[in-house]
Image (cartoon, coloured by chain):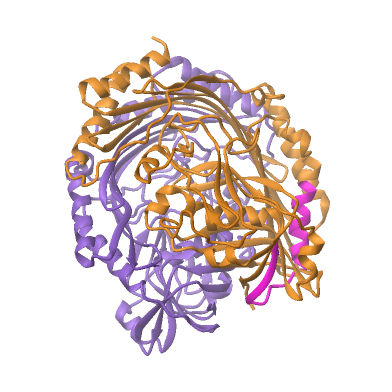
Amino acid sequence: MAVLEKNTMINAAERAVEAALKMGAQEAEAYSYEGQATNIGIELGQISKTNRIIDRGLGLRVAANKAIGFAYTNILDDKKAMENVVIGALSAARASKPDPDWKGLPQKKPYSQTAKTFDKKIVALTPEELVNVAAEMLDAAGQVDKRVLAIEGGVGAGYVSVAIANSNDITGFDRGTIVECSLATLAKEGSTVAPMCFEFNAARNFSLNPSWVGREAAKMSISALKTKSVETKSGKVILTQFALQELLTHTVINAIRADSVQRGQSPFKGKIGEKVASENLTIFDDGLLAGGLRTAAFDGEGVPHQKTPVIEKGVLRSFLYDNYSAKKEGTESTGNASRAGYLSTPSIDTTNFHIIPGKKTQDEMLSEVDDGLIVYYLQGAHSSNPVSGEFSVVATPAWKIKDGEITHCSRGVMLAGNIFELLKNISVVGGNERQMGSLIAPWIEVENVRVIGQ
Amino acid sequence: MTLKDLLTKINNVATQKFGAEYSETRAQKIVKTSLTLKEERVEAAKQGIENGVAIRVLVNGAWGFASVGSFDSSILDDAVSDACRMAKLASERLKIPIKLAAAKVIEDRVVAKPKKNPANIIMEDKIKTAAEVNKAILGFDGRIKSCSVDYVDLMGSSFFVNSEGTNVEQDKLYVWARITASAQSEGVFTSSREEIGSTAGYELFDEQTPEVLGVKVAKLAIEQLNAKSPRGGKFPVVLGPNVVGAFVHEAFGHLAEADLALSGGILADKCGKKIGSNLVTFYDDGTVEGAFGAFKYDDEGIPSSKTLLIKDGVVTGLMHNRETAQKLNSQPTGNARAEDFRVEPIIRMRCTYMAPRDRTFEELIENVKSGYYFKSFRGGQANLDGTFQVGIQEGYEIANGELGAPVRNASISGNTLETLHKVNAVGKDFLLDPGRCGKGQIAFISDGGPHIKISEVVVGGSA
């Protein structure tokens, strides 16, 4: 990959800020972005697709009389296009309404060193090497059982760099790499089709285990072939990381965002210092975690990333802030302004949402369940009520645990309840953490979950 | 060099220099305006330009794809070279080479004719419209705690040129808004949302005024405050067009996307077979004028069509691109869509709906002793094995043929095919609702149908 130099990226941002100030903006902030990715795609059991995507652009945010405007372009090397961005952002600000809560862009603060976010091996990977990874993953899945078909998946290598500059003298540059492989498999026997099962690896350095991914997805598919129903009752459920990610994203994550709190959309409002979860739950939002998928030196506004305690031993400690929501309360940003590349203005999001693991291994957790379920994939979590935390989802599928052993798979099992109640009913936090998008978590066992069988 | 000549030249490089058996280039010139209003506050008014080119080639039966945000001839030369080399590399392990179904060569220019072109509406007016929606929500009831409007419009053109001689230039026009509200009272939190969208023009807001939209969304959030959770279990239900649309889209539509059917989905071997009651007729229709999700040509240059998926309970067809049509010995249906130049076209729905029949709403509910009426949905999802889940935003109890108290936090789930057999009455009304569908990429779609009755479905709720 031929990537843009640090200076090119920073200069683009700085020039845009200068031009905006010259043309009448009181404040300006520019964010330049480069993303490059090479992907090898698997479809219906074979490697049949490849792609190479280069996306570059710049987003400019300006303030004029406390009104905010934003414009972006994906044409970086054209003077006229850059001029149009400045004109676009200023005219958007002038059309907008003044915001009395706008207290300015962030001030400059020193950045910490990040660890394990960039691996030059990933930038240098050839398509041949990526094809080999895909082939290894496919072969491993095929060797598990003939009834397994690799439906889709692939291998991808990506590079992202960002530069930020604002009129308070912030300048920053950061870059990172990511590599991932994933496989979705389906087992079929006669007319029985098992639900699709999925496994993946993702890392900031070139450390994939494609055989493991292929094997695990395939094994899961086979075990999902034979199903038996489960009864309707309330009981113990082990939520794996897949299920946790689904459930938390649409509810708890929303509830800890300072803007949700300020707008009365969070049941956590006014509960800092209060117990909101079981004592064994501790969560940090850690934007500096070594090797974390969301680790970077600074956030989408150039504010340094940090490690923020969210819940400690069940007690709510802090919400997540960007600069605007922090200034509104007279506090400091926690470095949680997130951006979708150059296309969007910053909005509050988690960095690495880290549920601190306990001590128990997977086997110990399973062996201690007399009667319960273990859930991997969930369907319908996005239909949860984001404000109240009420959810009603389908496990696709769930596995029954009886006397410490997984006995069978069951389909169409619904789980219903309230995520905020569920946090209080956490009985075990496992020791087996892994990262999935912004979530880093172990398995979590919860008591008294409403299970509706078929 | 014109853009068309440039794209043709790139296709020639692919076929002549790198031996591609097929090559297509798509260029996009788009201007987007978007804004978010939360309560009284304009978060940010935004304007953006997204220009770029996508190149897709078939070399020895494997796909290569490259996208760049540039019209620069030398950058495009590098991109087509990348795409061809990578495709060739992947083809070395191919067992079954990809082939494409034949397509008619088309040359056309599609011009959008909005009554109100969003490009001619000044930003101030767009902000004003959004502010009026929020004002209506906040003014509806003191228990409303928050509201937001996300607005996007997009204008521009897309160019499609392939190595077979097809060349199409289409204007693109979308106007879309999502409105949300939340309410709180006595420790109960509720939320509601509504989406509107059109490919016709900004006249959308003349049909649904900001005031009407705001009140509608506010009312939904307030009504839920006094609602109770439904009992979990199996019940007869009457579904409104909005929920029917979500069901048709999620529970059936995705299974009828030929790529997912081929991936071991349950419809793979069901063509010509009866999978539902006689009352079940579904279409995926890209020709509904002005509808969100309608267009003239897809991103493989295939004309959009009205595709019959099920007729009277019998599966009649799937939604295809050129690759799946060839595999399944069928015709491309014009369902290949790419969100933008950055990504490859994949099979997507357009306007997916159930055809109406003959019943009135009263006839549908009159024989329900104990069940639910679910009027609008909040998200839904399905698995390839035919398990579906649709969340409910607005629902009511039905007791002895009468509508009763509102319920919140409900969802329906089950097996699609079993459920289609249980459709035992279909209304004569009809509504299409705009929405967005995620399948790795976002697509603008519509879905809908009449009111229907299902004799039994699993209703999930807490309690």
Task: Provide residue B396's location: percent of width, then percent of height.
Answer: 75, 67
Q: Is residue B235 magenta?
A: yes
Based on the displayed image, in which of its 4 quarters is residue A104 positioned? top right
Asked if residue A32 is positioned above or below residue A250 in the image, the reply reads: above
Name the quarter where the C terminus of chain B is drawn. bottom right
Asked if residue A37 is positioned above or below residue A308 in the image, the reply reads: above
Figure disc tally: 0
**Residue A9 appears in the picture as rendered:** yes
Q: Which residue is outermost to the top?
A: B1
**Residue A276 appears in the picture as rendered:** no
Q: Nearer the viewer, residue A80 or A328?
A: A80
User: Is residue A104 toward the left or the right of residue A285 in the image?
Assistant: right
User: Is residue A314 toward the left or the right of residue B322 in the image?
Assistant: right
Name the quarter where the N terminus of chain B is drawn. top left
Q: Nearer the viewer, residue A60 or A426?
A: A426
At 40% from the left edge and 86% from the top edge, which residue is drawn?
A369
Task: Provide residue A65's location: percent of width, then percent of height.
Answer: 66, 29
The chain displayed orange equals B
Asked if residue A336 is positioned above or below residue A76 in the image, the reply reads: below
In the rendering, what colour is chain A? purple
User: Is residue B313 toward the left or the right of residue A173 in the image?
Assistant: right
Q: Is residue B414 magenta?
A: no
At 22% from the left edge and 50% from the top edge, which residue is drawn?
A134
Residue extent of the magenta highlight: B214-239
User: Is residue A274 toward the left or the right of residue A192 in the image?
Assistant: right
Q: Nearer the viewer, residue A223 or B145?
A: A223
Task: Provide residue A186's location: percent of width, then percent of height.
Answer: 34, 62
Asked if residue A204 is positioned above or below residue B388 in the image, the reply reads: above
Task: Provide residue A307's location: percent of width, then percent of height.
Answer: 41, 57
